[in-house]
Amino acid sequence: MNICLNDYYNEYKYRYKSPSQLARVITERWVEDNMYCPFCSASNLKPYNNNYPVADFYCNQCKEEFQLKSKKNNIGKTIPDGDYYKMIEAVNSNKVPNFFFLAYSHNIDYIENLLIVPNQFIVPNVINRRTPLSATARRAGWTGCSIKLDYISNQGKIYAIRERKIISKSQVVNNVLSISFFREIKNLDTRGWINDVLLVISHINKEIFTLKDVYKYKDFFKKMHPNNNNIEAKIRQQLQILRDNNFIEFIGRGVYKKNEI
């Protein structure tokens, strides 16, 4: 894997006047030439034809699909996406692709960061509904959305490149394997709850924490799951699932220890 983009830039710089279009073409070519499948370790990914509606790349071996989102400098906390209602429909029907979130340098000469988010972590609560376009806009009433990366737990954000440092392929694949139990959960509500509990645990700044520490975030859970009237029982249920899958260790009497995954 080579994070330098100079050869691609020199190849395409006179073909595209729009910087954003130039960056899109360059980063798509880079993924095609450099990226492997993080799920099955296949050595490369295949590009879909232009304007394929769901994804940009697929793995010919395991058939996983990937959509690439590229930004200049930093990935940030939110990523602009397409139509809100189509996105929610795709989430609810489990038809969302996996995502590559890529940040390139200001001059489009290096890959700064590449983040992999498995599609199971794209749940309704991480989709932000944007304000509809005004009545005078060309697409009046159209409602877009964005993906709130800061609402996705760390386990669902797997770096392949971080601050220009390439993470080994074996480590990336192992990180994906560590969440295999989560990827097997078909129920959308269950995935949302587990993601939210993992997110809260990551915000508790100590290795050993208590049930009461998690309960302090009851308002957050209520906001994320307004129709649930038994928040504490639901929290305990998710902690049990995380314990059974070795994300946390139960010490006793409402005390838990974070495990390194």
Image: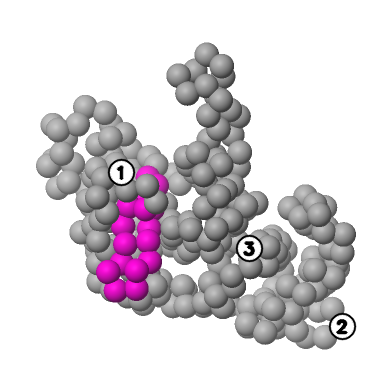
Percent position (x, y) of residue 213?
A: 81, 66
Going by the numbered disc 3, the residue's amino acid type is Leu
According to the picture, the residue beneath numbered tag 1 turns out to be: 51
- Tell me, yes or no, if residue 80 can be seen here: no
Left or right: residue 62 compared with residue 205 = left
Left or right: residue 141 compared with residue 15 = right
| Mark 2 / mark 3, whichever is N-terminal | 3
- Count the marks: 3
Q: Which residues are magenta?
A: 55-70
Percent position (x, y) of residue 30?
A: 24, 53
Q: Write the residue at 52% across / 21% down.
A: 140
Q: Write the residue at 84% across / 63% down.
A: 231
- Tell me, yes or no, if residue 95 can be seen here: yes
Q: Nearer the viewer, mark 2 or mark 3?
A: 3
Going by the numbered disc 2, the residue's amino acid type is Arg
Going by the numbered disc 1, the residue's amino acid type is Asn
According to the picture, the residue beneath numbered tag 2 turns out to be: 253
